Amino acid sequence: MPTFDPRSLTALCLLTAGLVQAQGPAPTAQVQSMRVEVADELDRLSQELDFEVRGIEQTEGATAHAAGESIVERLHLLLEDFDHVIVQAPGAGVERVIILGEKAAYVPPPMVVEGGESSETAPASGDEIVLATQRRGAAHLVTLGLEGVSGGAPMQESMLIDTGADRVVLPVSLISSLGLSPDALQQQQVQTANGTIDARVGRLGAIWVGPKRIEDVEVAFMDDQRLGGTSLLGMSLLGRFRMTIDDEKNQLTLAPK
């Protein structure tokens, strides 16, 4: 009768364990590296989870990773090559996704001061201020100077013009840089063109619009991730002017009321 060597069973168990360990991670790695058509995946997710997508046509032909544990993380990975804003619904859901355009290195646009002129814009008349804008799809961005409560040199910030926002909306990561105390900010819900959001509301010492210093501007701070890295220029500043946007020349004209 053949004898049984327990060492053979031990070796077999070790070999089997080694095969399981070697093969186990493979499906996960394949899922993490899987790329999908961005437009198709956005369309599928929006129908499945009932949220709106604006600017989806700008993603045609693009591919991205299909991964992420939450829907917000999944959308950020899917749109990693695009400037975008994700408006979250109460809880962990998503209400709206806005795609502004493909990411590109940001170069601050030239600025025209009162009565001044540049090679790309016409001179302003009277007290008007004309600012060159940068396009993100159908939207316009301008670069303004933010001055904290303690004064100092203005901080340059690129902002998306949003007439649907009650206030200027900034990412919370700027609070300390602007010399503001988080304890001095009030928790409120604020209205933007993309819906109602939770924010911390306070006031800046001033915002520089070209050469003009606009004092005591109410601002709202919200999570950087929700803003998608894009500040909003809302009506707490725009409402002090008569505003005209020239789509052909990419210009924002502000005239005193």
Image (cartoon, rainbow, N blue to C red):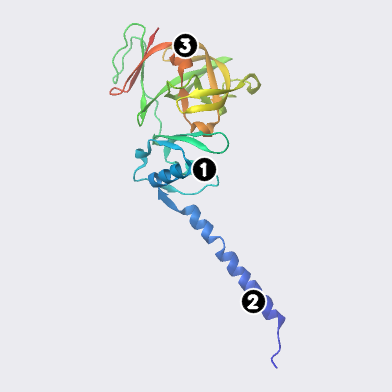
Q: Tell me what residue is drawn at x 36 percent, y 26 percent.
A: 134
> Residue 22's x, y, as percent?
57, 65
The C terminus - image quarter: top left
Q: Tell me what residue is drawn at x 30 percent, y 12 percent.
A: 123
- The disc placed on residue 213 is 3
Relative to residue 180, is residue 253 drawn left or right? Answer: left
The N terminus - image quarter: bottom right
Q: Mark 1 — residue?
A: 71
Gap between marks 1 and 2 measured at Cα: 43 Å
The relative height of residue 16 versus residue 138 in the rendered view (above or below) is below
Q: Amino acid at mark 2?
A: Leu
Which mark is nearer the camera, 1 or 2? 1
Within 10 Å of disc 3 (Cα), the crowding (few <14, some 14-19, many 20+) is some
Within 10 Å of disc 1 (Cα), the crowding (few <14, some 14-19, many 20+) is some
Identify the mark nearer the N-term, 2 or 3. Answer: 2
Q: Tell me what residue is drawn at x 48 percent, y 27 percent.
A: 195
CB atoms at circles 1 and 2 under 8 Å apart? no
Q: Is residue 157 visible?
A: no
Between residue 241 and residue 48, name the one nearer to us. Answer: 48
Q: Quadrant of residue 189?
A: top right
> Residue 170's x, y, as percent?
52, 25
Identify the mark nearer the N-term, 1 or 2. Answer: 2
Relative to residue 118, is residue 193 drawn left or right? Answer: right
Between residue 223 and residue 53, name the one nearer to us. Answer: 53
Q: Mark 2 — residue?
A: 12
Q: Amino acid at mark 3?
A: Arg
